[in-house]
Image: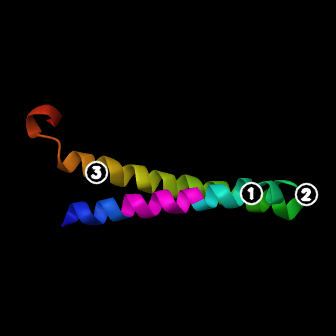
């Protein structure tokens, strides 16, 4: 049952990261200038880093569940 939660967490995290990446770097957004845009871009990148780390850690934990003890220690 744990593997289903980890798989759902990875899938959801990957979808959120993809959506944030699209919202931050589409051409319409990049043509915007101003101080507020810089703050929005910085905040979006920080949020994207956090969700990427969560998605990758759930992927590693999912892999660890199925790694035989002889190979992984």
Residue 11 magenta: yes
Answer few, some or many: residues within 10 Å of disc 3's Cα (few below 14, many 20 plus, some between 14 and 19): some
The foreground one among 56 and 18 is: 18
Task: Identify the secondary structure beneath mark 1.
Answer: helix
Q: Residue furthest left?
A: 70
The reply to whether the C-beta atoms of the residues labelled 2 and 1 are less than 8 Å apart is no
Cα gap from disc 1 to disc 3, whole angstroms:
30 Å
> In this rendering, would 71 be left or right of 62?
left
User: Residue 62, position in %: x, y?
Assistant: 26, 52
User: Residue 66, position in %: x, y?
Assistant: 17, 47
Q: Residue furthest top?
A: 71
Task: Identify the secondary structure beneath mark 3.
Answer: helix
**Which label belongs to residue 10?**
none
Residue located beneath label 2 in the image: 33
Splitting the image into 4 quarters, where does residue 43 fall? bottom right
How many dots with numbers? Answer: 3
- Mark closer to the chain start, 2 or 1: 2
Magenta segment boundaries in residue numbering: 9-18
Give the answer, above or below, for where 69 lies relative to 42.
above
Task: Identify the secondary structure beneath mark 2.
Answer: loop
Residue located beneath label 1 in the image: 41
The residue that appears at 32% across and 59% down in the rendered structure is: 7
The residue that appears at 84% across and 64% down in the rendered structure is: 36
Answer few, some or many: residues within 10 Å of disc 2's Cα (few below 14, many 20 plus, some between 14 and 19): few
> In this rendering, would 58 be left or right of 62?
right
> In this rendering, would 67 be left or right of 9?
left
The residue that appears at 50% across and 61% down in the rendered structure is: 15
- Mark closer to the chain start, 2 or 3: 2
Which quadrant: the C terminus? top left
**Which label belongs to residue 61?**
3
The foreground one among 30 and 54 is: 30
């Amino acid at each position: 049952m744990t593997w289903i939660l980890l798989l759902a967490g990875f899938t959801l995290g990957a979808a959120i990261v993809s959506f944030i990446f699209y919202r931050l770097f589409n051409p319409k957004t990049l043509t915007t200038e101003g101080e507020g845009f810089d703050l929005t871009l910085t905040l979006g990148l920080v949020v994207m880093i956090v969700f990427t780390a969560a998605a990758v850690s759930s992927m590693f934990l999912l892999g660890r569940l199925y790694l035989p003890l002889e190979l992984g220690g």
